[in-house]
Image (spheres, grey):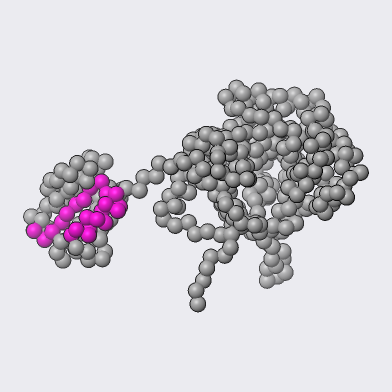
């Protein structure tokens, strides 16, 4: 019986996984600069966390979650995103009590959604995200957006478009909600069943509907920007001022929404304009939220964050033809001739690795020529040739694969010799 990988998942093999490692290391280094600390949460949580933390009316909760019962009948869900788990840990572990605030966290890990697989979109995908909890300062909004943009730019992406919007405070959103209901209600029967359910529950999410995006009422829907009160306008202006001061270009799009009730003020998306990237251009989405910590049992805590898919980031790099600077070379490949030399190479290889050198040898009893070919495949900087004759003289022949120069060195001096040339 043969087995195949489940639909919507992928094997990331050597040769490709190095790209993932490079991206993840770049993200970690960037977070360290911005003073975001890593958090690791369980891959599964109690289902209610996501029902409350992501939203009952969202497609994620209604259609996409992997939910099952454990042996004691408890409803468990594989995490579909990272924010709810991060905020749950923030509340449960009382991180809000720390003297230093805001609490700045990041995560990298697999998420799970049952949706139609397509290019750059999988049922198991890896998400990188950050959350800054505990500050109402618009400067932290600009910082979060700047970090996201910096990651993409550091990796070489150029065809980027940043879109921002304000959802206003609670007062502004209430006024906008009433205007949306009045706008859509007379013709709501022309919309999909999801939108009909959303009209009273969460009318803002109608604006995010993919089925009815071409409906004429979408174009004429009331803009949240027309309902912002003075405080919300000042907040949004501050965010824009900070972004401009950082040299970050952006567009304001009043139709960009975040559909959950606890989202407020800043919302943003980063998109790829690269030719051939695909119909779904969004690389990253984020926004400010109040009330999420309170919704899951904690104190009222402001927060802002973003999340991005590593898979879509890789697709964007491919679309722009960007090759990541992956170094697959090794320091030395040991070639042996004769049984005694082969035996000595085992301990020699261990000594080289213990000294921090990247080293390899043949384990298939290949001929001399084939061993040199293997050294080429490993992109070895040096090849150390050890035969029984060299072993008897306690020397080893070292060939520089770039220049072709070769010289003999004492075996016990090989490590220092290679270190001096690395």
Q: Is residue 368 above or below residue 269?
A: below
Q: Is residue 42 above or below residue 170?
A: below
Measuring from the top left, give residue 245's x and y in whole percent. 60, 22
Q: Is residue 297 visible?
A: no
Residue 194 falls left or right of residue 8: right
Task: Name the residue at 75% across, 44% down.
Answer: 213
* Observer-nearest of 37 and 259: 259
Measuring from the top left, give residue 149's x and y in whole percent. 57, 34
In this picture, which residue range is highlighted in magenta?
368-389
Task: Name the residue at 22% across, 60% down.
Answer: 370
Report if residue 371 lies within the magenta region. Answer: yes
Question: Which quarter of the figure is the C terminus placed in?
Answer: top left
Q: Is residue 203 visible?
A: yes
How many marks do you count on the picture?
Answer: 0
Res 167 quadrant in image: top right
Q: Which residue of the protein is positioned furthest toward the right in this rendering?
A: 186
Measuring from the top left, give residue 418's x and y in whole percent. 22, 44
* Observer-nearest of 279 and 262: 279
* Observer-nearest of 318 and 50: 318
């Amino acid at each position: 019986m043969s087995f195949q990988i489940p639909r919507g998942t992928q094997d990331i093999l050597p040769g490709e996984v190095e790209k993932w490692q490079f991206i993840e290391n770049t993200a970690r280094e960037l977070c360290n600069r911005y003073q975001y600390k890593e958090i690791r949460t369980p891959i599964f949580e109690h289902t209610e966390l996501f029902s409350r933390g992501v939203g009952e009316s969202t497609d994620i909760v209604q259609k996409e979650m992997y939910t099952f019962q454990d042996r004691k009948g408890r409803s468990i869900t594989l995490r579909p995103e990272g924010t709810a788990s991060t905020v749950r840990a923030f509340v449960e572990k009382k991180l809000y009590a720390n003297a230093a605030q805001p609490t700045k966290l990041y995560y990298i890990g697999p998420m799970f959604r049952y949706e139609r697989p397509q290019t750059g979109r999988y049922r198991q995908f890896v998400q990188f995200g950050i959350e800054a909890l505990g500050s109402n300062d618009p400067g932290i909004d600009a910082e979060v957006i700047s970090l996201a943009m910096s990651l993409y730019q550091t990796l070489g992406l150029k065809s980027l478009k940043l879109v921002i919007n304000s959802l206003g405070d609670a007062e502004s959103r209430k006024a906008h909600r009433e205007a949306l209901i009045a706008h859509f209600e007379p013709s709501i029967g022309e919309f999909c069943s999801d939108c009909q359910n959303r009209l009273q529950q969460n009318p803002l999410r109608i604006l995010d509907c993919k089925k009815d995006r071409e409906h004429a009422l979408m174009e004429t829907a009331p803009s949240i920007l027309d309902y912002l009160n003075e405080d919300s306008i000042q907040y949004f202006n501050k965010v824009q001022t900070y972004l401009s001061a950082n040299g970050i270009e952006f567009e304001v799009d009043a139709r960009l929404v975040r559909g959950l009730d606890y989202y407020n003020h800043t919302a943003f998306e980063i998109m790829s304009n690269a030719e051939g990237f695909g119909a779904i251009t969004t690389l990253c989405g984020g926004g400010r939220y109040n009330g999420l910590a309170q919704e899951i049992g904690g104190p009222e805590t402001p927060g802002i964050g973003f999340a991005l898919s590593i898979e879509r980031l890789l697709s964007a790099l491919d679309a722009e033809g960007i090759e990541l600077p992956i170094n697959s070379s090794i320091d030395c490949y040991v070639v042996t001739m004769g049984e005694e030399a082969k035996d000595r190479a085992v301990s020699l290889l261990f000594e080289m690795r213990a000294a921090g050198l990247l080293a390899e040898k043949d384990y298939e009893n290949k001929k001399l020529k084939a061993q040199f070919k293997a050294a080429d495949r490993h992109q070895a900087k040096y090849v150390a040739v050890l035969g029984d004759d060299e072993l008897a003289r306690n020397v080893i022949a070292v060939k520089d694969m770039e220049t072709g120069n070769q010289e003999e060195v004492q075996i016990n001096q090989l490590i220092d010799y290679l270190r001096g040339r690395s």
